[in-house]
Image (cartoon, rainbow, N blue to C red):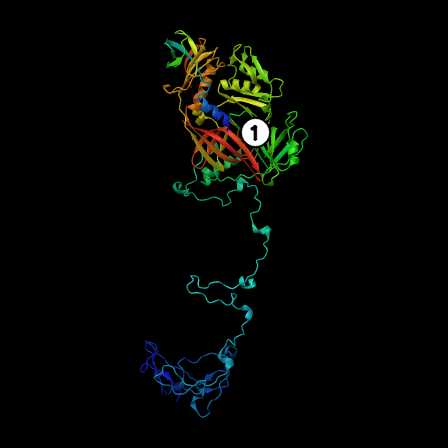
């Protein structure tokens, strides 16, 4: 028993807590019961290793005195799962240690050294390390940044400059492959959404009304004014709002999609003219539309160029998403800067010829109605009119209307302006509309039916306040005929009078009242010009083309308010068409 | 918006500054007049007698006005 060591708690030296290494112990036996650490003992009920049998890798009938502490395996060992080393060979036929340990004789160890088992016999290198031999390193797989240069330690970035490396190693995953564009953006072209299927997530649970809009910028909408929807859509939204979904922001999130469709042609022969940009605009104080177009080439400019010798203007027609306007081209200018080679074209509605370019009149009218004056003036001219002013009550005595060197449009505007009216040309260009400056008085806007409702699609919004003197009374009188009337705002003392209004066409109380009311509407309230940027999807869609005088109900993100259109500008450029609307808003 | 119209309004707020008023008292160089609303003010000119209706433009009497029927106060 010269080479067996065993563990015993009672022996020294100590290997950690409760471990000790004992030498010169004959064997491991149950009786020795060495303890491994605290409370851990080798309970050696072992059928130990004794003599080698013919069974591969197995020992049977070992002497208990020499056994290892684990018990005999009761089953049959499958040699296919045996340990990889071969059956043991006898080391010394005359020695009982032949079964002991396979690495041969171990020399005496120094007790003072914790683990020092002396020389170890050679073993089969093939069985020692199961993972085999190391492979040779492939030089091509070395770290790609090559050799680093020693740096100056005083430099903040100690690695200093790096050496240029082979780009092939810099990004080990090499180039990325070409993406399939057809699958890159899965949403691709948006298709028209069927409102009936818009809420794909189905019914949601009822929520606490107090917390249903946690992000704050949504507002409760007045669905009674959902004029922009078709009947089916409106019913659906109402149902969604009140019955099942409780989603008041659904209308505000409505998506407006439309196809851009712009055409620009010469009326005389239908010649198509290409354009880069275009805008048309009108406001309540202008009687005709104005066109501004940018053309890409001289060829296109020549198609519409006016004749400077005869002064004849080229008539053109522009269609923007289904809305059509007629214009006479007044001027063309070429842009030389930066070699653009583009042409700016300006035009006006055909009613432009009723102004300065047209004939002038010096005349005194006999007794007739105000409307008859306009009708007689435009009769046979190729122009028509729409009378939206006082009806059947406005008669002019003979000599009441007299002008000298006035254009036709001056006369029309004089008639309309006498009762606070304005003159507008329709987009088609040949019809004048005489309408009130305020078809509905601002004090009645709250109860009036709006011409349009805007609750979605507002792309931007700005405000320009206009403080007014807040007049509450005005004296209105005729000049040589008619009456004098004191027009006072109802519910006021008339203590803030406006400058008097005297006009020869104010011939009766109704006319004076109309004019006085317009004057007070215009100056009697603080106002603001609200500028809205909207899409223009085309006729039949919301928002429609808004015209001066239209009363609009706006459901924006913060509140619902009403305003009257003062002016509109429709512009188109490449793939977008917008209408910028200025609404007059009154603060009563 | 129509810039010219905005400019016009700046020049003559309230529109055409032609007024009709009744002569109350004639002084040496001015005349005290009263408009239909009962407001009295002085205008240049002494050519019209008390009780006559006159046209006043920019603070000066420019001529005699017809006696138009006063319809009184109309509320809007």
> Which residue, as the protein is rendered here, is positioned at the far right?
A269
> Which residue, as the protein is rendered here, is positioned at the far front?
B29
User: In the picture provided, is A555 more to the left or to the right than A409?
Assistant: left
Q: Position of residue B10 (x, y in %)?
A: 45, 24
User: Which residue shows up at 50% across the image and 43% down it?
Assistant: A199
> Which residue, as the protein is rendered here, is positioned at the far bottom?
A94
Q: Nearer the viewer, residue A311 or A78?
A: A311
User: In the picture provided, is A482 more to the left or to the right than A39?
Assistant: right
Subunit of label 1: A
Q: Nearer the viewer, residue A42 or B26?
A: B26
**Residue A576 appears in the rendering:** yes
Using the rendered view, name the quadrant where residue A266 is placed.
top right
Question: Which image quarter holds the N terminus of chain A?
Answer: bottom left
Q: Is residue A65 above or below residue A248?
A: below
Q: Is residue B40 above or below residue A173?
A: above
Q: Position of residue A162 (x, y in %)?
A: 50, 63
**Residue A1 appears in the rendering:** no
User: Which residue shows up at 39% across the image and 42% down it?
Assistant: A211
Q: Is residue A174 above or below residue B46?
A: below
User: Which residue shows up at 57% across the image and 19% down it?
Assistant: A407
Task: Report helix, strand or loop for mark 1.
Answer: strand
Instruction: Determine crowd level at label 1: few under 14, some 14-19, many 20+ residues with C-alpha closer than 10 A.
Output: many
- All told, the count of numbered labels is 1
Q: Nearer the viewer, residue A35 or A530?
A: A530
Task: Name the residue tied to disc 1.
Answer: A290
Q: Nearer the viewer, residue B46 or A552?
A: B46
Question: Which image quarter holds the C terminus of chain A?
Answer: top left
Using the rendered view, name the quadrant where residue A113 is placed.
bottom left
Q: Position of residue A550 (x, y in %)?
A: 50, 27
Q: Is residue A393 above or below residue A31?
A: above
Q: Position of residue A449 (x, y in %)?
A: 48, 27
């Amino acid at each position: 028993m010269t080479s067996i060591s065993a563990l015993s708690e009672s022996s020294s030296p100590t290997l950690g807590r409760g471990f000790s290494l004992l030498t010169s112990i004959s064997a491991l036996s149950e009786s020795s019961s060495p303890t491994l650490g605290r409370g851990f003992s080798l309970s050696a009920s072992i059928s130990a290793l004794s003599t080698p049998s013919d069974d591969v890798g197995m020992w049977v009938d070992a002497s208990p005195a020499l056994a290892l502490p684990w018990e005999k395996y009761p089953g049959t060992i499958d040699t296919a799962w045996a340990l990889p080393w071969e059956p043991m060979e006898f080391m010394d036929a005359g020695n009982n240690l032949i079964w002991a340990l396979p690495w041969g004789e171990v020399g005496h160890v120094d007790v003072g050294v914790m683990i020092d088992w002396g020389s170890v016999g050679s073993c089969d290198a093939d069985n020692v390390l199961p993972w085999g031999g190391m492979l040779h390193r492939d030089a091509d797989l070395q770290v790609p940044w090559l050799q680093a240069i020693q740096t100056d330690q005083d430099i903040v970035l100690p690695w200093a400059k790096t050496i240029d490396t082979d780009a092939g190693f810099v990004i080990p995953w090499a180039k990325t492959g070409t993406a399939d564009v057809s699958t890159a953006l899965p949403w691709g072209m948006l298709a028209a959404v069927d409102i009936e299927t818009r809420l794909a997530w189905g019914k949601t649970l009822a929520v606490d009304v107090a917390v249903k809009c946690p992000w704050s910028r949504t507002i409760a909408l007045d669905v009674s004014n959902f004029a922009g929807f078709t009947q089916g859509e409106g019913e659906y939204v109402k149902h969604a709002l009140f019955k099942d979904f409780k989603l008041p922001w659904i209308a505000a999130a409505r998506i407006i999609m439309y196809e851009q469709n712009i055409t620009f042609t010469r009326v005389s022969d239908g010649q198509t003219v290409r354009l880069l940009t275009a805008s048309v605009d009108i406001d309540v104080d202008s009687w005709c539309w104005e066109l501004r177009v940018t053309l890409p080439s001289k060829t296109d400019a020549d198609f519409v160029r006016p004749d400077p010798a005869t002064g004849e203007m080229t008539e053109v027609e522009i269609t923007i998403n289904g809305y059509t306007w007629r214009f006479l081209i007044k001027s063309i200018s070429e842009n030389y800067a930066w070699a653009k080679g583009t042409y700016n074209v300006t035009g006006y509605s055909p009613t432009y010829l009723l102004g300065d370019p047209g004939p002038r009149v010096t005349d005194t009218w006999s007794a007739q109605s105000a409307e008859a004056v306009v009708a007689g003036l435009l009769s046979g001219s190729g122009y028509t009119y729409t009378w939206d002013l006082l009806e059947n009550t406005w008669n002019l005595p003979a000599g009441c209307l007299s002008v000298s060197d006035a254009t036709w449009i001056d006369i029309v505007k004089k008639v309309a302006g006498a009762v606070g009216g304005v003159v507008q040309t329709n987009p088609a260009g040949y019809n004048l509309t005489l309408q009130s400056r305020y078809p509905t008085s601002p004090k009645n806007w709250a109860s009036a039916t709006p011409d349009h409702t805007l609750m979605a699609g507002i792309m931007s919004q700005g405000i320009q306040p206009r403080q007014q003197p807040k007049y509450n009374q005005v004296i209105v009188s005729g000049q040589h005929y008619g009456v004098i009337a004191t027009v006072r705002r109802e519910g006021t003392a008339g203590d803030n009078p406006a400058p008097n209004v005297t006009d020869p066409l104010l011939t009766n109380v109704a006319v004076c009242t109309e004019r006085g009311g317009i004057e007070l509407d215009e100056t009697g309230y603080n106002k603001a010009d609200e500028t809205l940027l909207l899409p223009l999807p085309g006729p039949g869609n919301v928002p429609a083309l808004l015209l001066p005088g239209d009363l609009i109900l706006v459901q924006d993100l913060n509140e619902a308010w009403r305003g009257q259109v003062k002016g509109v500008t429709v512009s188109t450029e490449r793939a977008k068409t917008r209408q910028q609307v200025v609404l007059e808003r009154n603060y009563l | 918006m129509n810039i010219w119209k905005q400019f016009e309004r700046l020049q003559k707020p309230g529109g055409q500054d032609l007024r009709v008023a009744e002569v109350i008292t004639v002084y040496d160089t001015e005349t005290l007049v009263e408009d239909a609303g009962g407001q009295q003010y002085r205008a240049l000119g002494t050519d019209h007698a008390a009780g006559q209706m006159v046209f006043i433009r920019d603070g000066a009497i420019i001529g005699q006005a017809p006696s138009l029927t006063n319809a009184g106060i109309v509320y809007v």
